[in-house]
Amino acid sequence: MSQLPIRRAGLAIVAAAILTACGHPEQNVIDKYFQAVNARDNQTLASFALVTFDKKVDKWTVKKTVSENKEAAPLSALVKKQKDLEAQFNANKKEYNTYNLDHLNEVTEVRELKKSGGKIPPKLAATASDWDKFEQKEGDLKKQLANAKNAAAREKANMMVSIGNVDQVEGLEGDVINKQVELELVIGGQPETYLMTLRKYDVKPVSGKGGKVISRWVVAGLQKA
């Protein structure tokens, strides 16, 4: 009995495996994304995508990978910035509280005059100037700190879409991989070119306890080319 049919079948399986390996490994997440979009399944989308899409897509095809880059995962730097600003805010607060105690009568009078809209007399000009600087610095730091907290919280939430509900996310360091792929979407019967950004994290605990955290590709962006 000839072995050719068996050999041909084996070669066909190998060839199929090679084609799969050389294809687009993100195809599954892209398929899942547009299936959920078409089904208006926002719950499923929220589990692996950071962006939504408001059009029904008749067909989608991956044309090519446009770019791929790896850079340091930003969460640890964002958390550090937040802590640095908290320290600056607390230091400024301590400084003006001390100043207030040392110049209690003058500061009280300045604050009352400002509240009533009264004119600051020359003898209180220096105190008013100092107090203005403290208040200005406090306002600036408060705004910067709020922005830093929002940025860290946003990145933490985005990161957890890729790595799951991992404990001590702030204690993870490593890289984030961003890949941009070109898609052809058929919408309303018309082909259109879109760019999709996919992202996943390659991180592990700074403490060294435990290995790399398992992550998955998420859809981080989708815009018309």
Image (cartoon, rainbow, N blue to C red):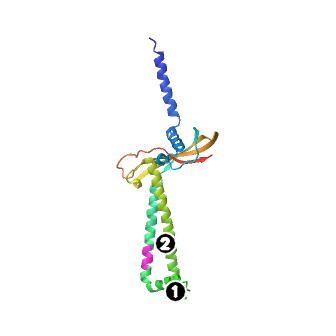
| Visible residue check, residue 200 | no
**Main SS of the magenta segment?**
helix
Between disc 1 and disc 2, whose residue precedes? Answer: 1
Is label 1 in a helix, a strand or a loop? helix
- Name above or below for residue 133 compared with residue 211: below
Of 146 and 206, nearer the camera is 146
Residue 31, position as x, y percentages in the image: 52, 39
Give the residue pinned by disc 2. Answer: 138
Residue most extreme to the right: 190
Give the residue pinned by disc 1. Answer: 124
| Visible residue check, residue 107 | yes
Placement of the N terminus among the 4 image quadrants:
top left
Drawn side of residue 215 relative to residue 117, left or right: left
- Name above or below for residue 38 compared with residue 82: above
Is label 2 in a helix, a strand or a loop? helix
Residue type marked 2? Glu
Residue most extreme to the front: 39
State the separation of the CA atoms marked 1 and 2: 21 Å
Q: Residue 97 in magenta?
A: yes
- Name above or below for residue 143 compared with residue 95: above
Residue sitting at x 42%, y 78%: 98
Residue most extreme to the left: 209
Q: In which quarter of the image is residue 118?
A: bottom right
Residue type marked 1? Leu
Of 150 and 106, nearer the camera is 150
Mark 2 surroundings within 10 Å by alpha-carbon count, few (fewer than 14), some (14 through 19), many (20 or more): some
Of 138 and 45, nearer the camera is 45
Q: Give the range drawn in magenta.
A: 93-98
Residue sitting at x 51%, y 71%: 139
Residue 222, position as x, y percentages in the image: 57, 47
Residue sitting at x 60%, y 44%: 194
